[in-house]
Image: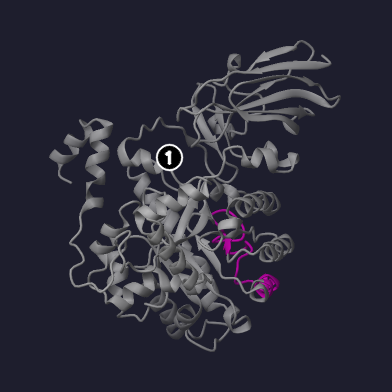
Amino acid sequence: MTTLESSRVDQMSPKERSEHFNAHRYQTPGHEGWGQVATPGAPNKYLMVSADCHVTEPPNLWVERIDEKYRSRLPRIEVDADGVKWSVVEGYAPIKIRDLKMEGEDQERANVGKGNPEERLKDHVRDGIDAEVIFPNRGLNMWATPDPIFSQAMCRVYNDYAWEVFGPYYDRLSPLACIATGDIDSAIAEIERCARLGFRGLSVPCKPMWGPGTSEDANYNNPDFDRLWACIQDVNLPMTFHVSTGKDPRGAKGNGGAVINYVIHSLAPTAEPLVHLCSSGILDRFPGLRFASIEAGIGWIPWMLRAMDEAYEHHHFWVFPKLNMLPSEYFRLHGAASFQEDPPGVDLMEKYGLEGNFMWANDYPHHEGSWPHSEQAIERTMGGLSDSQREKILGANAARFFGFDVDKLLAYRSAATAQA
Amino acid sequence: MAASIRIDWPNVDNEQGRPMLWFGSWLTGSDGSEAEWFHSARGAAAATYPVPAHATGIRVRRWPSDGLDAEYADLLDLERITDIVATDLDFDTRQQFSLLPVEHR
């Protein structure tokens, strides 16, 4: 953006600004030459499974349901001596409340994504989505505390809610069970409970203990967590690491803060649990584990794989334990990663043999996602892929990883078409 | 301490144009800890609530925006309170049991 453009944006009304910044979402080179398409309602549409969506939970969910001893610690708005309002969450630095007026489709995205399954299904039809994996929205705060017992109590509330609302729709709308791993005993109990309910996967934090972290903190490479891995392997559920679930993603403030925080303090830390799993021998001891990073993009995955192997080979004299395979090979066999619009990652996928590991998502209803213009986003970024590659990353990989019944999903689509 | 307190939960709209979500709970002890809750609903309501023996105050929460967490106001003078209108409470001043870190207070 030029200085002139920047000045022009400042003079725009909120509605004009919304239209200006959302205009790119409509741009597409089209899908000429594609055997299948991402067009909603098209008879030759790909099976599309969004590996990362969110539900905006009822505001009073936790205050109503959590054990009363924890209620006063739940997130809330506080007022300082000057009358300024702050969002206070136990593990975050206070965030000043800003009066954000959204307009146009920004406002539309802010209004959808609630816990109404029928409304969600309509929104997904509009965007061409056959099934979704659901993560919390305000519930991403559940891990933001140094107290893993409190965190587990919040997770249990969310899991109960998620199953009550989406259990009857679980073949298409699938929240994952949220687990606080900092307390291993309660984590195992909650995993076993949720597996019995029927959840198809787990959402675990990027670090078991919330915070910036030191080498003294408990972390996943510590063999103390073997009991947890044994449990997860035993229930045979994939685990996911969503962005912003290990430390405060607002590590920077001031100029550029929103960009710095998104790239450095939210997305980048998601690499940590993947490297722990691939380099510390966990996957030799528990070969049934499956894991995925969520919403962190994929362009960095080839770099991470190369960096892990480089360290393993070049620093072999420091490396322990010695592994059965290179660290990168564990990722290819056990790992996955979700992304929204990540052209560098898509471009690198074939070269680095990762077309079986990447899972597309529209991140509904978040602004960094592509709803309701996923068709255009896919056409912008995936024109260089083959039909087979698009088929895998748009749905087949996620269906396999999370255990969706593809025949059932296609039957739903046929039924909807017949009804229309 | 009053044996019961009547609370009027008026019907006002939040930022999204939906009826305001109200929540009422009892405070206990002297550190802002909460005990059981007695009201959680959107929109207009009015009821009389028996005051539990262990109660040291009332915490009223409201959600002026569905996208944000709750604001709250604490009422600690149970000796004198008999009637409350939730919209008359002051949600715009610092509360005694604030969780704001000291440097932000």
Q: Quadrant of the C terminus of chain B?
A: top right
Vertical arrangement, residue B25 with respect to residue A124, above or below: above
Whether residue B101 is visible, yes or no, is yes
Q: For the point 58% across and 24% down, which residue is it?
A: B43
- Among the 4 quarters of the image, the one containing residue A263: bottom left
Check disc 1 and give the amino acid type.
Asn
Mark 1 neighbour class, 10 Å CA radius: few under 14, some 14 to 19, many 20 or more: some
Q: Quadrant of the N terminus of chain B?
A: top right
Identify the subunit bearing mark 1.
A
Q: Which residue is mark 1?
A: A111
Whether residue A369 is visible, yes or no, is no
Residue A249 is left or right of residue A169, and the answer is left
- Residue B73 x, y percent position in the rendering: 63, 23
Magenta region includes residue A365: no
- Residue A62 x, y percent position in the rendering: 64, 42
Q: For the point 18% across and 68% down, which residue is it?
A: A32
* Tally of marks: 1
Q: Name the element at disc 1.
A: helix
Residue B32 is left or right of residue A161, and the answer is right
- Residue A77 x, y percent position in the rendering: 55, 32
Q: For the point 77% across and 27% down, which residue is it?
A: B30
Vertical arrangement, residue B48 with respect to residue A211, above or below: above
Residue sitting nearer the eye, A322 or B20 = B20
Magenta region includes residue A212: yes
- Among the 4 quarters of the image, the one containing residue B39: top right
Q: For the point 80% across and 17% down, which residue is it?
A: B4
Q: Main secondary structure of the magenta part?
A: loop
Q: Which residues are magenta?
A: A202-231
- Residue A381 x, y percent position in the rendering: 26, 65
- Among the 4 quarters of the image, the one containing residue A306: bottom left
Query: Hey, which residue is sitting farthest bottom in the picture?
Result: A324
